[in-house]
Amino acid sequence: ADYNQLGFNLRSNIFQGGPLESRSLMKDSYTPDIIQKAIRDPKNWHGRRTDELGKWHQKNILNLNLQKALGDKSG
């Protein structure tokens, strides 16, 4: 019964889907010049700073990629 009701609703186009135009609360709240003046600092991402452990992981990934590339190149 539930399956038939769901099929009827889908055929009747009751579920219209999402809006065709998306809206942003930030764009609605601020003027365009404020959005353009916003400076995005990669070291201070959403108020979170990259700590030493994060820097170590970045360097470790680069090192692993380098070791893999050298291993592939040498044989």
Image (tube, helix red, strand yellow):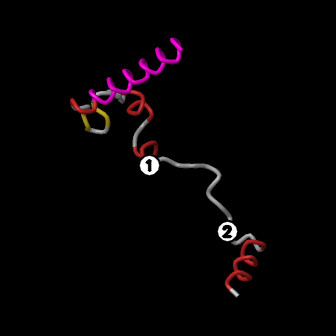
Q: In which quarter of the image is residue 33?
A: top left
Report which residue position mark 1 lands on.
Answer: 25
Report which residue position mark 2 lands on.
Answer: 15
Q: What secondary structure is the magenta-colored segment mainly?
A: helix
Q: Where is residue 53 in the image (x, y as percent from the top left)?
A: 23, 33
Residue 72 magenta-drawn?
yes
What secondary structure is found at the residue carrying circle 2? loop
Of all residues, the one furthest to the left in this rendering is 52
Is 32 situated left or right of 7 in this image? left
- Closest to the observer, 64 or 22: 64
Observer-side mark, 1 or 2, equals: 2
Residue drawn 51% across the image and 11% down it:
74
Pointer 2 local density, CA inside 10 Å: few below 14, some 14–19, many at least 20? few
- Closest to the observer, 37 or 12: 12
Q: In this view, does 25 lie above or below 46?
A: below
What secondary structure is found at the residue carrying circle 1? helix
- Mark nearer the N terminus (1 vs 2): 2
Q: Position of residue 73 (x, y in %)?
A: 53, 13
Q: What range is drawn magenta here?
A: 55-75
Is 69 situated left or right of 61 in this image? right
Residue drawn 42% across the image and 44% down it:
26
Q: Quadrant of residue 64?
A: top left
